Structure formats: structure tokens, C-alpha cells
Image (cartoon, rainbow, N blue to C red):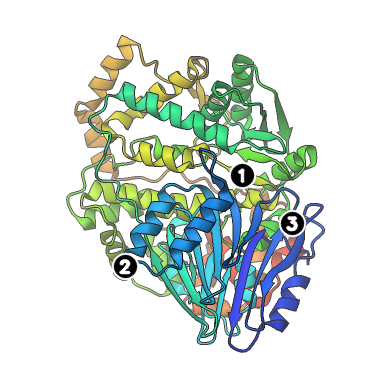
Amino acid sequence: MSKLSMPGLSFLCSADGVSNQKSFYLRSAQSPDHPDGYKREVFFENEKFFLGGSSYDGYPINYFENDDHYIFVEGKIYFDGRESLESRLVSFAEELFSGGDDQKNLIKSRLLHFDGAFIIFFFDKRTRRIVIVNDLLSRLPFYLYCSENSICISRDYSFINANIDEKVFDAVFVSDYLLFGYFLGTGTFLKDVERVPPSCVITIDVDNCSVSKEVVHEFNFEDKKHKYKSANQNAKDLAELFIGACRKQVSVSGKTIVSLSGGMDSRAICAGLLKGGQEFFARTWIDFDKNAKCDAETAEQLTKVLNIKWKVEELPRALGRKNLDILTLKNGFADFTNVHALSYFTSVRNEFGTDIVMLSGNGGDKVMPDLRPYKKVKSIDDLVDFIIAKNCAFSLRAVAALTGGSEEKIKRRLRDHILSYPEKSLRQKYVHFLIYERLFGRFLEGEDRKRAFFWSSSPFLSIPFFCYAMNCPDSQKTNRYLYAKFLSMLSPDALNVGYAIQYGTNVDSTIRISIAKDKSLFWQVIRRINKLPNPVRFIYKKMKGPQAEEKPKVRHSVFRVLSNCLKEQIDGCPSLTQVFSDGALNDVLAKLDEYDTRSLDRLFVVISAIEYLSNGQSTIEKYSGEDFNYFE
């Protein structure tokens, strides 16, 4: 069974020594699907610990050393000015290990000025202490496991899993995944294994094999610093920051690729690159069943208007082997709904090599629109009900039945989690939920798949741009008003091309909506009218309540294959009983045709992840030539 694995740093410290684990680590990255030049090596070690890394040509892992410190950096950090990355990191290391007062604020200040996606590993030769720091948004997901005599930290969840003797799966966090498609907070499939949160400082004493961690910064989205500025001024400032982010994130040694869809986010990147005078190539994919045809048609219009180099990739049908690749690569942290994207990444890599940067619009749909609930929430219980109704795939009742919990217990835990957010306003707590749970917990994990093929980034998640955008007033973001102004300052031509919207997977007819023109008196009138109470809309929403988007059924041709695979997984994996109640899965199998694609995908991912993490093998391998594409 060939296994794709994530590139990046891995660290193991054990009081019993690490020689056996180091040998296994070096042997376990053999897969014909890895790019040419893929390697795994140990950078730094002694009898109790080692730091290793997996990489390929162009993957950013850098190393610095002076008399006092070893410093390893995974990822990219962007600075303005002449001071080098090395000098800044050496200065940071000196501050970290100086033992001065107010270390938390010192580190926070540093991170606010470190723009990029990174994990930094510092080792102090004098004290033999290790400090690991990640960026403000945790752009590079990584995981931490601690036992009585060992500490394991890695970008690759499989490495963590391989160093746990007795695996215990967490029904609480599995409930999260079934309900939302991502884990809340720092949860993962396995107990005692956590996803490291943003802005986290992990301190390790290698002699005692002890660890402590602290989050030095958490965003509070309540106080909008730019609320007194006009929409014009905010749009202008955002455009300047965005152009700067695009300029910093382009490839220096290779080529820059923009993954261009028919939406607003990727066209903004094209416009920002053009405005900054950067060269790039645009690529768009169409899946085998042509579900993304409307995206490609709109992308083609944009490339003609903007006069950019572009090609569309027509992808082959995604078979079970792609599900297997996603599973071994992300261990359940990315779902199966877009497995055809792996063929797209492979095609881009084959054309341009691995030493490239792919820019995508990831995060644009979170930082630019008004994320507040569309209805008033009068209490925390109202907000919990809204979150579940708006973001769930499985019903709360179904999740409780599957995991043997109670609906009230699941809601109470969600309630306590939401109350822990720093915002006081319930509506802003929902914004926090969408950023910290949905964006960080789902979309950044999904984006991370690309880094097995080449480096990926997004100007929308540049720290200066993110901080500014999240401090703009929500009233300016309503109806994408600020977004339209922002895009018009980057490129009026890009603004003039309508954008494609796909509802579910029914794309027989392309729905195009023209983006409002900022200077249009008609638009300004409509914007103001739209703020007024609409009795028809109000009554309709009251009757329906907060609705999640339409959920299509699994296509008939896939149903039999999926049903057989699930049955074999359930019969062959005793560990599933740790998280699922007796008979619950068999009840699902008996009524499988009643479930929609999103529900079944989440169930399939959870079952597949637990089987793979538990057994080291996956039943999906037997179905590697079968069609698992759910959608009509």
C-alpha cells in the first residue's frame, strides 16, 4: 500500500531513547506518488530526541546556527526592509531564552510582525531547552502528543499515530466531525493528540522530557479599529495591503500559478498580481462530470478581459485510489468531496515542477463578507441552535444516536466552547466560530493538501491584510459592498465580469450574478433598501428557521460501491466501537439511501480514518479502481 505523507518537520523526545523510532521514520516515506526529489532526513539529534523533516525540491525548510542556538524554519516568512530572516530569528531566539519579564507579550509582538505561514524550532545550546512557535493563523497545521515519557510533534499525523502504543479514539471530537465536518478547538480523532492552535508557544525540556504550551494571542473580532473610516478609505487601504501581499508571496526561484475559479477571490489575486507588475500563470480545472464547467467559462472570460496566460485542466474521473491518497495524506482532516483536486495538483506539478507557488483565494470568503448571523440571536442557546442548523450535515439527533451521546450534552459542550471566545457580542462570537473553527479547522487543512505537491499560499491570509480586513466594520461588508469597492480599485475590468455560483452540484444552468458597481446610484439605492426590514423575507425565514444549504443525494452508480466498502470497514475494524454506539452503524447501512452526500462523506471519512489509524491499512485499497464520486 503506497502512502502519501505530508512534508514538514517532525520531532520526537523520549526518556527511553529514540533510535528505533528514528530508523522507522527514515524508512517510512517510500511512495511512488511522491514528487521527484522527495526525501526524509534527520536534521538534529541525540540519544533522547531527534528533529527530522520531509521535503522535496522547493519545499521551504531552512536552518540557521550560531554559538548559542540551532534554528529550523518550516514555511515562509515575509519581511519588508533590509534585515535578513536569519538576523531576525537570531534576535528572536535571544529574547526567547533571556528569561526576561513579560515573555508572552514579547512573543506576541514578534508574531504580529512575522507575516507568513511557518513553524519555527529553536534549540538553546546553553539550557538545552526547545521552543516551538507557529504563526498567528496556524497556516501549517501540526499536531502534538504527550505521554508520561514521550513528546511527539509533527506536521504528519501518521507520524504521531505511529508513536502511540495504545490508540484511544475520542467520541466527543468524532461527534464534532460528524456534525460540522471539522473538530472544535484543538481536538483530533485520537485522545491526547491535539492540533496545535494558532499563536502557540511550546516549550520542551529535553533532559526531563517535559513540555508546556501557551497561546500568546487570540483574535477578538468585536472592536473594529477601522469603523470610523469611510468604505472608500478602507477599500483603498485593503487594496494596497493586498497588492503588497501578492508581491511578497510570488515565487522567487520558480513560477507563480493562480488557481482561477469563477468567483471573486481568485480574480482579486489575478488583479492584485497585475497591479503589482508580477508575472504568473492561471490554471482552472474541470472535473470529469463537468460540475465545474461554469467556473471554467467565467474564468475564461476573466483571462480575456485581463489578458493573462491561462489553461484549463480537464481531469480524469477520480477513482478510489484518490480517496486513499487523501486518507494517507491528511488522515481524515480533509474530506473526500474534492478528491479530483489531487489530479489537478499532479498536473500542475508535472507542468511546472515542485519549485513553484500556487496562490488561491482561500480565506477570501471569510475575511471580506459580513459573517454575522442574518437573524437576531437573543441568547447563547439561540446562537448554538443557529450554528448547528446553519453548519451541520448530520442532524444533531443522528450524531447523538451514532455516538451514544445525548443531544443536550453535545449542545452544552458547544455552548461552553462558544462562551470561551473573547468576544462579548453573540453575533461576533459567530464570526469567531467561522474563523477559528471552520476556516482554521477545515479550510486550512484542505489547503494543506497542495503542499504535498508544491508550496501554496493566499494573499487574503497575509497577516497585515487579515488584521485590517477583520477590523473593518461589518456594515461596510454587508452585501459585499466593501468587497466590490476593493475589487474595483484593483481592476474595474475584473469587477465587470459576472461571477459563477454553484448551488450544491446542480449546475445544468449557470447562475451568474453581476457584481454591483460602486459608482452606480442604482446600487447605492438598492443597498439602502436592502437594509430595511422585508416582511416577506422575515416571515419566510421565521417559518423555515436557519437552513443549511441543499444537500444532494449520492448518485446511484456509486451507492453500491460505497455501501459495500462501508460494510467491510465496519466488520473489520473493532476500534469503531470506541466511538460508535452498538448497532448504530448497522442502522445507518440499512438506511444508507436516505442520507445525502455531505452526511455520507463525513461518515465515510470518520470510518476510513479510524480504520486506517487503527490498522495501518484501508479497505479503500480494494476499491482503488472504483468510482467514489458522490455527485450527479
Q: Mark 3 points at which residue?
A: 321
Q: Position of residue 316 (x, y in %)?
A: 75, 41
Q: What residue type is labelled 3?
A: Arg
Q: What residue type is labelled 1?
A: Ser
Q: What element carries label 3?
A: helix
Dividing the picture into quarters, in which one does residue 538 lie?
top left
Q: Mark 2 points at which residue?
A: 413
Cβ atoms under marks 2 and 1 closer than 8 Å: no
Is disc 2 surrounded by few (<14), some (14 to 19) or many (20+) residues within 10 Å?
A: few
Q: What element carries label 2?
A: helix
Q: Is mark 1 on a helix, strand or loop?
A: strand
Q: Which of marks 2 and 1 is nearer the N terminus?
A: 2
Q: Is residue 412 left or right of residue 364?
A: left
Q: Where is residue 89 in the image (x, y as percent from the top left)?
A: 53, 55
The residue lying at 33 percent from left, 47 percent from top is 431
Q: Which of marks 2 and 1 is in front?
A: 1
The residue lying at 23 percent from left, 27 percent from top is 531
The residue lying at 35 percent from left, 12 percent from top is 519
